[in-house]
Image: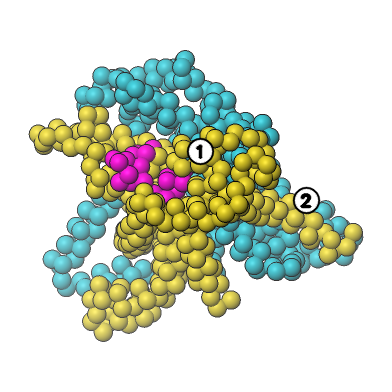
Amino acid sequence: MNSKIMNDAMNNDANQSTPQASQTAFRAPHVFRRWLGTFGRGVALTVLFIVIVLPILWIVSAAFKHYVDIYKLNITFTPTIGNFFEIMREPFRVQAKLLNSVIVSVSTVIITLPLALAAAYSFSRFRLFAHKSMLVAVLATQFLPPVVIVLPFFLMFRDLGLYDTRTSLIMVQTAMVMPFAIWMIKGFIDQIPLDIEESAMIDGATRMQVLVQMILPMALPGIITAGIFCFILSWNDFIIAVILTSNNAVTLPVAMSLFNREEGDLWQLLSATGILIMLPIFVCATFMQRYLIRGTVAGAVR
Amino acid sequence: MSERFIKYAMVAPGLLIVLVTALYPLITTFYLSFRDWNLGRSNASSALWLPSDGISQIGYLFDNYSRALSDPSMWNSAWVTARFTVVSVILTVGFALAIAVLLFGKGSVRAVLRSMLILPFAMSPALIGALWRFMANADFGVAGAISRALHLKNVDILGNATAAFWLVLSSDVWHWTPYFALIFIGALASVPKESQEAAEIDGATPLKVFFSITLPQLWPVLSVAMVLKAIFAMKVFDQVVMITNGGPGQATQTLTHFIYFQGFKYLNMSYASAVGWLLVIPTMALTVLYVRLTQRGK
C-alpha cells in the first residue's frame, strides 16, 4: 500500500488526470481568474526554488571566496580554491577529520547491512515471538532523545578507555542506523515472491543458501538504498560525535567548531568544510533519489 | 538446525544491538537520576555500579527530580522546547502541505522541484545550523546584505531573544518541510479523484474541494506526520548548538541542550539524567500515540 503511494508520488506525471488539470478545464471561462492562478503558482514555485537553493548557494559561493569578498558581500567575485588548502594546514588539518568521517561512516554501513539483512529477512519470512511489537520497538528506539542515549555511553567508553576513538563512534552509530536499515530492507524483501524460495528449499537448499544466493541479489537495490541512507545518517551525525570525541576521532560536522575562533568566525574556511560535508551526501541523494525517498518515507507513515 | 532456531539466530544480532543500545542508557540514566554523581567531584572509573566511591547516598532519592522541578532554568528550557515543538509542527506540516499541493501534478518545473526536495532533508543538521548562523550575521551574512542594500541599521539577530528563537526554528522547518512534503505528495496521489471531480461539477470552488474533500482524506497521514514532527522537534539539538548555543542568555536553550550543558559542562551526570528522564516521558507518550496511529486498523 505504502510503496504504491510512493510510486505514485514519484510518477504522478504519468497520471492521466490530476486535480489541477481538471480544475482548469472546468474554470475555463474565467480567463482572468485562471491567469491569476497561473501567476500565483509561478510566484509560489519561484519562492520555493529560492528558499531551497539560496542557503546552499550561499555556502557554496562563500567556500570559493577570498576573506575580503566574504565581508564585501559582493555577488560577483574572483573565485579561489585557496580555502580548501587552508583548511588542510595547521591548526585545522581537516583531512584528518575527513578520514575519521569516512572510516566511521563506511564501517558503520559495512557492519550494519549484513546484520540488518538477516534480521529483515527473518522479520519478513517468519512469525517471531511478539512479532509486531518487536518491529515497532525497533523503530521506536529512534524516537528517544539522543543526548540521553549517548550520556551513559560516554561514561562507559570513558571507563573502557574508548573515549575519543573511532571504535566507540562506530558502535553507537551502528545501533543508531540499524532500525532504519532493518525497516527499509524488510520493505524490499516483502515484495519478493515466496514461491521461488519454497521451490529451492524443496530442492534441498538451506535457509542460508536461499538468503545469500537468492534474496541477496534480488534485494540488492534495497540493500544499496538502505546502505546509502545509513551512510547519510552516520555521516551527518553531530550529537554522538560531539559527546564521544574530543580530538583524535573528531568527524567533519564536529570539526566545524574549529573555525569559531576568538578573533571571530572564519566563514570562508567553515564553508569549505561545509562543502566536504555536503558533496558526498548530495551525490548519493541525487543518484539514489527515487528509491531513497520511497524507502525513507514508507517506514514513517506505515 | 531447525527453522525455529534459524529464525531467531538471524534476527538476534541486529535486534540485540538496537534494544541493548536503547535499554542500557535508559536503565543507567534512570539509576543515576536517583544518585548524586558529579564527574567533576568523583572522577572514579566504573563508578556506575560501585556504591563505595561516593555516589550512593542514602536519602538522596528524589533530590534531582525535586531540584529539577524547582529549577527556573529547567522550566525555561521546558517552555522553549514546548513552544519550539508546537510552532515547528504547525509551520512544518502547514508548509509541507502547501508545497505538496503546489508540486503535485504534471510539468517539468514541478518534477525538478520535487527532486530538489531531497536536498534540505539530506543535509547535515549541524551544517544547516552553521549556515544559518552565517546567514544571520550582521556583517557577513544574508541579514547583513539585506540591511546594507536597504540602508538599514545592522540587526543583531543572534542577540535578540525572539529573533534568535525564530532563527533556530526556521532552520528546523527548512530541514524537515521537504521530507513531509514528499510524504504528502505520496498521500495526495492515493486520494481518489472521483469525489473531487464530482464536487467541482456541482460548482464547488477549488479551495472548498480541498478543505472539505481532499483534506479529510489526508487526515490519517497528516496526524501521523504531526506526531512524528513533534518527536523530531523535541529532539532538536544540532542547530541549537551551532546557531545560538542556547543564547542569548537561555532564550533558545531547549531541554536537550540543557541536559547536554548539565552533563558535559557542569559534569553533573545525575542531574542531567534526571532531566533526561523528564524529557523521555513525553517522548514515550508521543511514541505510543505514533504507534497507535500507524497500527490503526491492522
Q: Is residue A256 above or below residue A48?
A: above
Chain assignment, label 1: B
Q: What range of the chain is rendered magenta? A: B242-260
Which image quadrant for residue A187? bottom right
Looking at the rendered structure, the kind of residue marked 1 is: Leu
Q: Is residue B131 left or right of residue A249?
A: left
Per the image, the residue denoted by label 2 is A212
Identify the residue at horizontal 71%, vertical 49% (top origin). A115
Q: Is residue A10 left or right of residue B205?
A: right
Identify the residue at horizontal 26%, vertical 73% (top origin). B206
In front: mark 2 or mark 1?
1
Seen from the viewer's position, the closer of residues B64 and A155 is B64
Circle 2 residues within 10 Å: few <14, some 14–19, many ≥20: few
Q: Which chain is yellow?
A: B
Q: Position of residue A205 (x, y in %)?
A: 87, 58
Q: Indicate whether residue B250 is drawn in magenta.
A: yes
Identify the residue at horizontal 50%, vertical 66% (top origin). B285
Seen from the viewer's position, the closer of residues A184 and B111 is A184
Looking at the rendered structure, the kind of residue marked 2 is: Val
Q: Position of residue A289 (x, y in %)?
A: 49, 49
